[in-house]
Image (cartoon, helix red, strand yellow):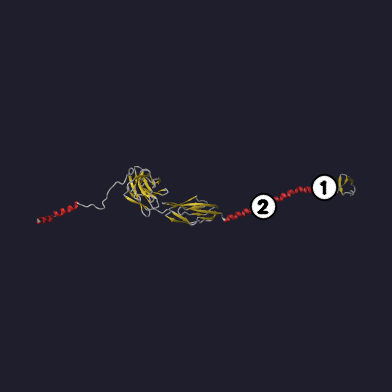
Amino acid sequence: MVDLRRKYFRSGLIPLVITSLFLIYIPPSANAATSTILGNTGTGPVAITIDSSGNIYTANYGANNVSKITPGGVSTTLGTTGNGPYGITIDLSGNIYTANFNSNNVSKITPGGVSTILGTTGLGPHGITLDSSGNIYTANTSSNNVSKITPAGVSSILGTTGDSPRGITIDLSGNIYTANYGANNVSKITILDAPAFTLSSSSGSANAGSAISPYTVNSTGGTITSYSISPAVGNGLSFNSTTGVISGTPATAAAAVTYTITATNTSGTATATYSLTINADPVIVAAEAARVAAVNAEAARKAKEQKELTEILALIPKIGELTLSLGETTKSLYSTKCVKGKTTKYVKSGAKCPKGYVKKK
């Protein structure tokens, strides 16, 4: 008997049987998973997210709505979406956002179930994510790009991706990454800071004929790629769309003009205002003042001459009257008429007529 046991141990038969017995019975693990159905959703749920309280939300592609399932398994329809919601995410306030593949937009549903269209996207938005400022980003499968929608609903194309982006995420620096289904690669889109800038002065002035030096531009946010201005500059001035500075030599004086300068980069735009007053050239002002003074002096001289002439002309009737008066006075003094043939003379009253003249009454 002993020899048989030794024989079987040597051959490996008994150890094999013992090992097999241990393999037949494996005690259950304390961490074994169990599966249950938590709750029902709308038709065709394709994406899922969860809030801090453990509530589950699904984007229901076939029903165009979002389902909410509580930790206790109570299912409700939270709100409606655009057409074909494919991606879903949630912010810290509990607002739900869906990327609507068939209507190229994003829906927002408040915790109270109020549904709105937040903004438009590229073609076929699939994945969706958001940043700490509440901006929404979608991976647009059909247009190979990423859309950005601000909390206020302003939509823009952030950047391009590889072929058919579906998944999307964002890092702590705000860089966007997409999983490109059709290209087997990942795209990274670097987010620039929103443009911000200040002017060294909010207003300035210059003289016509002299070059202006109104202000400098200080960029304080992002890499500003271009500037624009409204209204358009003129009057000998020019605007540099790269530096954002007005320069030149104004030709004529002008009232103060308030310009709105806009800085732009891929993250958006920012504006600042500048008021510029162009004064007249002092040399021209002095020359014009002298000209006006000369014109006024000449006008005063002519007016004086005209007044004097008018006064002289007004005296003519009076001189005639004076002459008549003198004649009458002479006649009254020499009232004695003396006649000699056809000659007549007058002498003072009471005087005798000259020799040869006969006194006539």
Q: Distance from label 2 to label 1 (Cα)? A: 43 Å
Q: Alpha-carbon neighbours of circle 1 within 10 Å: few (<14), some, or many (≥20)? A: few
Residue 156 rendering spot, x and y as whole percentages: 41, 48
- Asked if one can make out residue 258 in the rendered structure from this viewpoint, the answer is yes
Relative horizontal placement of residue 323, taking residue 50 as reference (left or right): right
Q: In which quarter of the image is the N terminus?
A: bottom left
The answer to which quarter of the image holds residue 289 is bottom right
Using the image as rendered, state which of residue 174 and residue 61 is in the foreground.
Answer: 61
Secondary element at tag 1:
helix
Give yes or no for contact between labels 2 and 1 (Cβ–Cβ under 8 Å).
Answer: no
Relative horizontal placement of residue 361, taking residue 230 as reference (left or right): right
Residue type (three-letter) at the residue carrying disc 2:
Ala
What label does residue 63 carry, if any? Answer: none
Residue 4 rendering spot, x and y as whole percentages: 10, 55
Residue 89 rendering spot, x and y as whole percentages: 36, 49
Secondary element at tag 2:
helix
Using the image as rendered, state which of residue 15 and residue 266 is in the foreground.
Answer: 15
Relative horizontal placement of residue 215, taking residue 14 as reference (left or right): right
Q: Alpha-carbon neighbours of circle 2 within 10 Å: few (<14), some, or many (≥20)? A: few
Residue type (three-letter) at the residue carrying disc 1:
Glu
Residue shown at 77% from the left, 48% from the top = 318
Q: Mark 1 points at which residue?
A: 328
Using the image as rendered, state which of residue 182 and residue 304 is in the foreground.
Answer: 182
Residue 163 rendering spot, x and y as whole percentages: 34, 48
Residue shown at 67% from the left, 52% from the top = 300
Q: Mark 2 points at which residue?
A: 300
- Asked if one can make out residue 101 in the rendered structure from this viewpoint, the answer is no
Instruction: Tell me which numbered mark, 2 or 1, is placed earlier along the sequence.
Output: 2
